[in-house]
Image (spheres, rainbow, N blue to C red):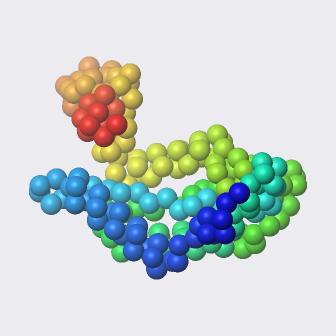
Amino acid sequence: PTSPAQRDQHVPAGEYEQNVREVIRAIRSRASPPSGATFPIVLMTPPPVDERKWTDFCEATGRDVARRSNRASRAYGETLRGVAADLSDVYLLDIFKVLEGDDESDVGVCERGSGKAYSQYLLDGVHLNTDGNILVYAALMDLIETKFPQCLPIPPDEPWTSGKNAGNKSGTTEDINTTRKGLSMDEKPWTDLC
């Protein structure tokens, strides 16, 4: 069993915001290029919560029920939205919205009876299942492609990854990087980061 302090894992909004800003500062101070340029950082909101499913999971597995709610998840997401709006090259991926959790209630009924429609993307009411992770991945790739396509990961087996004319089926001498942007996953900086 967990202690009451462990069950209540929430951090006050102001402290949460300070922590997020400090993490961003720490990353940027260690990883920014000498030119002073910044690189994009993506903040992801917490997902919606199916409180009923979470409670059932905790009870079925013999765990104390740690308090989780859509209201708290939404509030933390709004804090992240403010940080992203305030800092340059910081973007927000609204997971709450991606999983269609932006309704106003905490509990509801869908066809499966376990909660809102977003419940189908949650393993235990809090953590994403495979389908939820697939949706988040797709939304992240869309954000990267839209906002900073130069950072889009290009798998090593794609023909677009090795300089002039790579994968160019037209026979011209056009540099392929003008038509396909991104970073090859088998070259720097991916090999340095992963």
Q: Single out the residue that lies furthest toward the left.
A: 35
In the image, residue 54 sits, relative to residue 102, either above or below, namely above
Residue 94 locus on image (x, y percent): 54, 61
Residue 159 locus on image (x, y percent): 34, 22
Q: Is residue 177 in sight in this rendering?
A: no
Instruction: From the viewer's perspective, tell me whether residue 107 is left or right of residue 192.
Output: right
Q: Quadrant of the C terminus?
A: top left
Closer-to-camera residue (157/57): 57
Q: Residue at x 34, y 68 (%)?
A: 22
Q: Quadrant of the N terminus?
A: bottom right
Closer-to-camera residue (45/167): 45
Instruction: From the viewer's perspective, tell me whether residue 26 is left or right of residue 114.
Output: left
Residue 74 locus on image (x, y percent): 61, 70
Instruction: From the viewer's perspective, tell me whether residue 171 is left or right of residue 95.
Output: left
Q: Residue at x 40, y 62 (%)?
A: 91
Q: Quadrant of residue 173?
A: top left
- How many marks the image carries: the answer is 0
Residue 154 locus on image (x, y percent): 37, 33
In the image, residue 41 sits, relative to residue 168, either above or below, namely below
Q: Residue at x 22, y 27 (%)?
A: 163
